[in-house]
Amino acid sequence: MSDPGKRAESVLRLCWLSPSAASLAVLGRSAVAAAWPAIRCDPGAVLLVVRHSEVPWPGRSLAVPPPSFPATALEQAALIEDALHRLDQPDGFVNWSHPLLQPIYDACLTIAHLAQRLAERTGRCDPEAAWTCGLLAPLGWLAMCAVDPEAVAACWADPALRSDPAETQRRHWGIDQAAIARRLARRWRLPSWAAAAAEHLHLPGELAQAFRADPVLFPLTRLAIDEARRQGVDLGLGNGAFSTADRAALLISVDEDLVGWAESSSPATPSLVSLEDSAHPPTLTDIWQDPHEVPLLRDLLELAAENRRLREQPLHEHLEREIDALQRALEEQVHGEARRLQSGKLAALAEFAAGAGHEINNPLAVISGQAQYLLSHQCDWFREEAEDAPRQALEAIVAQTRRIHGILRELMQFAKPAPPCPGWVDLPTLLGEVAAGLDEFGRQRRVRIEVALQPERLPVYADAGQLRTALTCLLRNAIEAAPTEGWARLGLRRPVEGEAIEVVIEDSGPGPDASQRPHLFDPFYSGRTAGRGRGLGLPIAWRLAQLQGGDVRLDPPRRHEPTRFVLTLPYLTMPNSDLVDAPLVQLSCANSRQAS
């Protein structure tokens, strides 16, 4: 199926995800207690059970399942009748041992295991309900696996999935996984506690609760997804932006390491699993057989089948599209509001800094002038027997006033920089110049500087001086953050027409922790305690990048990956493509090397 639009239509027509023949055979037995452990690794069987489990939990949120979950659902005759009715549908079965789908299935199991262990450790909710939410959180991925395994594998292998998952999914599938989850969760009548964990992962907790997300299961599922991403399992379900709030909802300290829980747990206390031990135990679901290929299965279930459920009317489809648009608009508003608040805060700080810098500079100039005047007349004003003490005191005053003036000059560069004078600049050449200029600084700190000049020519329309200053601030910050014998890297991501140019500044340091990230671009804030700088480098880089029509951001931290700041610039086409044919900077310094 080569047309993404047809994929989107097909996935939204799915009647269900069919359990395997072995799972349906287990559900047909009378021993309810043994059924769940045998089918809990089968997404289709879990979905079937969950659809029949909407029972309030006394004393808890009305959205969560009862303590007897999933026993109450397994006891209902309607569950078997539902399965028989849906067996009339020819599609929906997925062979999860297929090589193209095995990574997706393993990712779902990893999230489910982590959610269950979090529930067991916190004691805040039913571990089996947590397992279910974790397994079904990638509901859009699960449904697309039943429609087009090749498209799922292509999306999984696309490098753009990690940076922009929704757009990557729409490009491969014609629809994103969150939109699939929203539609199918309603069409398949999933209970709100399970549906919300798949539909609203990109919303703040309080907004998600307005859509009936459970106040415990929802943040727990999102934390399990974050931990899975740290272990290298990333389906693009979240970006970790709400980790602090989710921890607070579960009464987990911001400083507490979830991985450390696994290491410190006693044998009597189940611990969080890692990626290595996430393989599921052997069950009947290890044999994935299409139930349509087992003719005696209907005889085992032996119940009258119901008529197919009527398809949604065109009006409903129109309303669903509107809900999808509103959901996207709400997410954009939430994230846009955070960016506007940050920009407004920095603008207010800049206004304050401009006024304070001007007011401080005036008396500072008087102090410096008077000290220099006394110093020039020391022979007339001081006795000879005073030796050098007056001169040394005056020189110290002059030196400190100059130091304060230097700080104010940097602060004014952030608060009130000169209007930019843009022109066409060759960006790779400028990157080489910036790296060469900081080579001696890197050598002093024993940090290797790497430069990737790919592509070799890339014109940008910007103020060359201000852009050089911004890049210098970012690279200097990377060098200071890298450990001894570490490295800092300056490079380009090959631009795509219509998208922003991205300059990537990476280092081998540990990166800022969660408490530092909101303040990275605040003036005079530094996360380094020993030998801390003035904390003006990142604010100046952000301010000057904004003047060029760009921005500076910290990419979400990922386990086993370097700390990565990204400076973006508008991608414009030169009216005249004859860029000045100047040779690229050749880094002859021993400390720098050209990265491939």
Image (tube, rainbow, N blue to C red):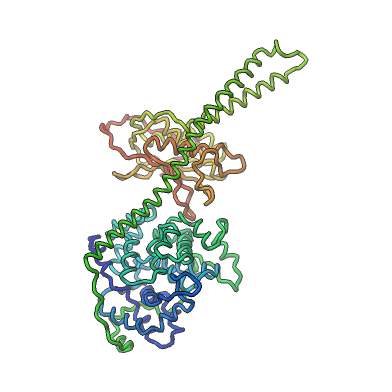
Question: On the rendered structure, is 204 left or right of 399?
Answer: left
Question: On the rendered structure, is 304 left or right of 367?
Answer: left
**Residue reaching furthest to the right:** 385
Task: Give 504 or 241, whichever is nearer the viewer.
Answer: 241
**Residue 195 picture location, percent across and down:** 38, 67
The residue lying at 32 percent from left, 30 percent from top is 581
Q: Is residue 33 above or below residue 206?
A: below
Q: Is residue 6 above or below residue 587?
A: below
Using the rendered image of the protein, determine whether residue 279 is visible from the camera's viewpoint: no
Question: On the rendered structure, is 484 left or right of 45?
Answer: right
**Residue 36 picture location, percent across and down:** 44, 79
Q: Is residue 111 above or below residue 29?
A: above
The residue lying at 45 percent from left, 38 percent from top is 347
Question: On the rendered structure, is 588 left or right of 534?
Answer: left
Task: Give 178 or 439, whichever is nearer the viewer.
Answer: 178
**Residue 147 picture location, percent across and down:** 28, 68
**Residue 224 picture location, percent across and down:** 47, 63
